[in-house]
Amino acid sequence: MAANVSGQAPVPRLEVRGIKKAFGQNVVLKGIDLSVRAGEVVALIGGNGAGKSTLMKIIMGIYTCDAGEILLDGKVARLGKPAASLAAGIYLVPQEPLLFPNMTVLENILMGFSENESELKKRLSRHMEELGVTLSLQRKANTLSIAEQQLVELLRGMMRNAQVLILDEPTSALTFGEVQALFKVVQDLKRKGIAIIYITHRLTEVFEIATSVAIMRDGLITLEGPVENFTKEMLIQGLLPGGAEVQQQGKRAYEPVRYDALEPVLKVRNLSGYGFSDISFDLYPGEILGIAGVVGAGRTELISTIFGRDKTLGGTVTLAGRDITGLPTSRILKEGINFVPEDRHYHGLFKIRSISSNTTSALLNTREIGRVNMNRRRQKEIAGKYVDDFRTKIVSLEDLIGSLSGGNQQKVVIARALSTKPKVVILDEPTRGIDAAARGDVYSIIRQLKDAGVAVLMVSSDIEEVVELADRAVTVFKGRINGEFSREEITQDVLTSASFGIVQERTV
Ligand code: ADP
Ligand code: MG
């Protein structure tokens, strides 16, 4: 940290002192002290539901705190409204992007600016160049993937010349190339003296980008200091609940699938649709098939076509011997395929409904229940069982789903998919935006599915995730499958190159 002439560390650009916040019974922040100086990148890490996003929303004026104060350049600031925080030069790129869905990218970015539009556009294209973003400004926000939405949010922040920039898990939906581009921008902003708070669940990123690190646990900052003072193991240890020991990640514990003894449950033949063509693969019971590739390769379109959401333009899909090509989603659900979408925000959950009715809502679509109003007690019973099984962190089943952190929301969505007892579950980016601890829980849920004989089709841009979980993987490049890899062949290298169109020579 740079010292000023008098030999003392400069006054932090942003400092929070004694911040407290409770949601009803749930005390989330118990007195948080944190500061960030100009040119510093503070990495904030902590378990899912630790309160990181809540603290950032308080700084951004989206939530008010119950106690504590916020200082800017050493002076107590009167924030409490987003407009005040924006005016003070603070900008938050939120974990769940909040764009206006029916407006274009350009309209979303330039909203709230009063300067001359052609000047603004010039600045914007400069920022896009720096970021290496090639996004059509005329696209409607509701056609963007999460990664693209986050890039739009980031561009908005850059356009505002923010002096304090907060990035809430920005990389969880980005591809390798996009992450590298983002890091370049962050380095650049750091050099320009911007103060940055960087929330992440990827510990390697902490060492790549941060100047200091803070761990949040049980509503407090439990560990803090310059990154040089820590190793990755120390951070993992610091993230675990008090007393827990670091577990060595063992080898995959379960038996590999024995394909020779099995009939595929799902057969996809020469399937074509919008954004992909001529795709063929089999999926076996008890198998996790990873579909890797970069954002925009056509994977989301592929699975939403299989699920009956998008139009089939050619080819066939057979489920347990029955032709289900082109059926509507309601029929596909009854036939035994369920889907956990990438975008929890728009497709996954009814934010204004309770945890228990969200868990059981899929049952309303199936023949088994078929009633419009499910008995509330039965609802609670089913939801309660999944909450226990999945170790979902909740206060009450009647709480609104929107009050849960990302990892816990995801568990509810997976529970909902399972409650229909499907033969095939399709997961789209199952751990996007979920921290290390909850990620482990979601992985064990996925393995439980496999052990129960469910066939899992998993789309993931997180190559490590595919390496960790998949029995077999295919890579999709520009709308076509360009590689298929057995368990033994799957490595991070091979999948990454194939995702970018480079299929390596096999040495078998
Ligand atoms: P993190 O970002 O560290 O994963 P969050 O700040 O999202 O954690 O959540 C912290 C806790 O606050 C969670 O238990 C969550 O359920 C609760 N929470 C967050 N926002 C709300 C809200 N609007 N209403 C009620 N509870 C909330
Ligand atoms: Mg969060």
Image (cartoon, rainbow, N blue to C red):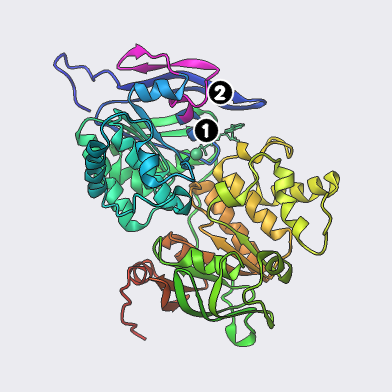
Residue 440 spot, x, y in % from top left? 54, 53
- Quickly name the residue at label 2: 21
- Give the magenta part as a residue range: 57-79
Mark 1: is the Cβ under 8 angstroms from ligand 1? yes
Q: Amino acid at mark 1?
A: Gly
Secondary structure beneath dot 1 equals loop
Residues under labels 2 and 1: Cα distance?
9 Å
Q: Quadrant of residue 45?
A: top left
**In this rendering, does residue 469 appear at all?**
no
Question: CB atoms at circles 2 and 1 under 8 Å apart?
Answer: yes
Find residue 201 and name its label. Answer: none
- Quickly name the residue at label 1: 51
Q: Residues within 10 Å of mark 2 (few under 14, many from 20)?
A: many
Task: Decide which of tag 2 and tag 1 comes sooner along the chain.
Answer: 2
Q: Quadrant of residue 354?
A: top right
State the quadrant of the N terminus: top left
Between residue 417 and residue 466, name the one nearer to us: 417
